[in-house]
Amino acid sequence: MHIDKGVIDAHNKELLAVHRRKLAGVSETVTDPMISKLIEFEVAIPSWALGTGGTRFGRFTGGGDPRSLEEKIEDIGLLHALNRSSGAISLHIPWDIPADTGAIQALAAHHGLRFDAMNSNTFQDQPGQAQSYKFGSLQHVRAEVRLQAIEHNLEVIKYGVALGSTSLTVWLADGSCFPGQLNFREAFQHTLRGLEEIYAALPADWKLFIEYKAYEPNFYSMTVGDWGQSLLYASKLGPRAYTLVDLGHHLPNANIEQIVALLLMEGKLGGFHFNDSKYGDDDLTVGSIKPYQLFLIFNELVEGMDARGMDHARDLGWMIDASHNVKDPLEDLLQSVEAIMLSYAQALLVDRKKLKEAQQSGDVVMAQEVLQAAFRTDVRPLVAEARLRAGGALDPLALYRTQQVRKRLIKERGVSGVATGL
């Protein structure tokens, strides 16, 4: 479905006076360059997160899930029309193989969308698949299984080239559940050789993102189990291989902001999968559990990117990776994008000069004050202003509900459809 621009304009007109008053409250901190950065910043929406998410025990659809890649693109187009910060889609192959890449690319362009990182899938056996990934893919002891995984990644690259993507994300479920199940060194070496073949097949303007995860589905070891292992692979592969950070892929209480800072320092941070968690890879709404940590991560991102002269919007890959178990998926995605934009805006407000002075003088109290002053600033009017100038809705979630989008999607698509993906 589609929300007409006139509907968005009418919505904004009703809220404009109140918005102006709220914006005046943070006017001292608002600058046009800051607004421009917020307008340019976009977060890719994964194709697999547009339907109702599941758990290990079940999936409870709310109805209206997209039934095809075309409908997923339409849903992301709707999100982008509302918030103007969701102008990219990330595909997972083979969940979303385009039957006609030209038509899919044209449909995405119609909705103002580009294709972000392509994602391969060697953590599931697909119908008709010759070799099983039960005991791993690129790490597997049998060459024919490794070859199948390599060929799948090469196929994903071909689809990505046809759609205009310029990056590939590889996440491996490879690992072991029990001591002695595999030889750690051989598993690493097999995986590295497979990644080398995939890396060699990348087009000249492409990047390879290597995603790590501390545990799950394997619980004794993961072949790419942490940022150090990912960095080791990326360093051995070459300058176009990078580490990808998923916020849920760490052991509890990991200092993700420090990880981010060091990867940026080494020029090896490729991008993010945003979500939130209480215990592990919970895939909850971004910023719903640990909003201060999210801000601290963005604080390191802004400082580190500026130190390297990087473009905030384009030089790293930004994507949501979440599972919407009890929420309307589109509402959840609107909330997640908003949380990301708020944390980014707060990080832009940090007084870098004052923070540096506090760090250099050992003034721990003042360093905390500088960070918390930015975090405690209500930047919602600032983000809304950027959205308004970009042509989006002042209150995307409110307009979504006013327009009864989910009810209309259920009427159009039914209540029992299940989208591919999580």
Image (cartoon, rainbow, N blue to C red):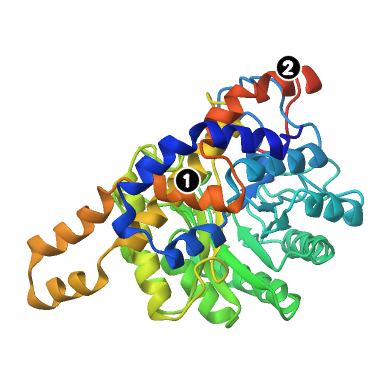
Label drawn at residue 384: 1
Image height of 150 relative to 404, above or below: below
Q: Quadrant of the C terminus?
A: top right
Q: Is residue 321 left or right of residue 416?
A: left
Label drawn at residue 178: none
Image height of 363 relative to 289, above or below: below
Q: Is residue 345 left or right of residue 328?
A: left
Residue 225 can be seen, yes or no: yes
| Place of residue 267 in the rendered image (x, y in percent of width and height, measured from the top left) | 47, 78
Amino acid type of disc 1?
Ala
Who's the residue at 70% across and 40% down the image? 5
Q: Which residue is mark 2?
A: 415
Q: Quadrant of residue 116?
A: bottom right
Q: Secondary structure at mark 1?
A: helix
Q: Is residue 209 left or right of residue 148?
A: left
User: Is there CB contact under 8 Å for labels 1 and 2?
Assistant: no
Image height of 326 relative to 394, above or below: above
Who's the residue at 47% across and 72% down the image? 231
Image height of 205 relative to 355, above or below: below
Q: Viewer-proximal residue, 159 or 186? A: 159
| Label 1 crowd bin: few (<14), some (14–19), many (20+), radius 10 Å | many
| Label 2 crowd bin: few (<14), some (14–19), many (20+), radius 10 Å | some
**Number of numbered tags placed on the structure image:** 2
Q: Viewer-proximal residue, 6 or 422? A: 6
